[in-house]
Amino acid sequence: MNIIEISSKFPDELSCIEYAERLRFGNSVRCAYCDSTKLSKRRSDHRHKCTTCNRSTSVTVNTNIHNTRLPLKTWFYAISIITDAKKGLSALQLQRNLDISYPTAFSMYHKLRELMMIENKEIEPLEGIVEMDETYIGGRPRRQSDSSFKPMQREHLDAQIKEANNNGFDFKPKGKNRAKTTKAVLYGRATDNIPVVGIVQRNGDVVAQVMNVLTYENLKTMVKKHVDEANSLLVTDSYSGYKSMKKIIDHIKVDHNRFYSYKGVNSNTIESFWAIIERGIMGQYHSVSAKMLPNYVAEFVYKYNNRKDNDAMFYEMLENLFKRI
């Protein structure tokens, strides 16, 4: 559901409220507190007065956006913008698009991510060929000069830098802009970055979770929870944590030190999913906290699993937004 469709189908606040009421109450609007149908006419603030419990009621009462001060149309637009952004969207961009404050945009976005996490729990067990892998979320330090940087090239560059300095150009970093470099750039398991483990069914859904400790027991628990072991074949790399998976499921290991794909045996599907997450975090969010990382992972999982139908995401998020809690 794109912006043009939203503005056409829901042209004003009342149309959004009436749609939300149909989602929550069906054909007969009821009091959100006592479930009575004896309501006054809609007031200027679009609320009703219940003549049974004598309380002011609206469609947002006791929902995931209880006490929201934002118009429902703003929520509708936010859902449309966020679900349409395949690789995520920064809260600053959402702030600019909706003309709201940054704290409000940040809070809205995480509320919608929480709803995505709820939907992810309803994923059917994966089956067939399933691929499992892990990635590590976090920044990578910049690489310093290596052995390929020949002494003659350094001398030539030193001469150019000296000449530029004499002409008033200073390359030295100032204050907090100093770049961090290292001669030994570490990747993957050798870093302190946060591990995220994922399992994907080929041509199907994906599940992923932050897993602070990578052990066989934790990996096995995830497989048993999300995979139909009797009707599946697991493909992984040769990481030691997967070596005993054959005890619970048919298992093929791909040794990436030798090859990445052989006659269709590979983990390219899950690697493609990691690429979406990495591009989203590096390109949109730039960095995420360990506390909030599960929310961001949930967003990418939800969008991947609904990648073939944007409209379904929009309506499903609206339905969850107005569920009674």
Image: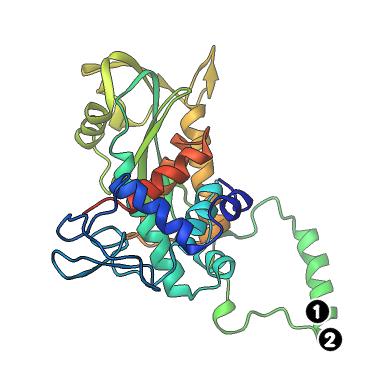
Q: Residues within 10 Å of mark 1 (few under 14, many from 20)?
A: few
Which amino acid, mark 1? Answer: Lys
Residue occupied by mark 2:
166
Judged left or right of residue 96, residue 129 is left
Q: Position of residue 114 (x, y in %)?
A: 33, 53
Residue nearest the viewer, comparing 230 with 27 = 27
Secondary structure found at label 2: helix
Q: Residues within 10 Å of mark 2 (few under 14, many from 20)?
A: few
Residue occupied by mark 1:
162
Residue 315 in sight in this render: yes
Q: Position of residue 292 (x, y in %)?
A: 35, 59
Secondary structure found at label 1: helix
Q: Is residue 305 above or below residue 48?
A: above
Is the Cβ of the residue at disc 2 closer than 8 Å to that at disc 1? yes
Residue nearest the viewer, comparing 268 with 225 = 225
Distance from Cα at disc 2 to Cα at disc 1: 6 Å
Residue 191 in sight in this render: no
State the image quarter where residue 246 is shown.
Answer: top left
Q: Which mark is residue 219?
A: none
Residue nearest the viewer, comparing 132 with 26 = 26
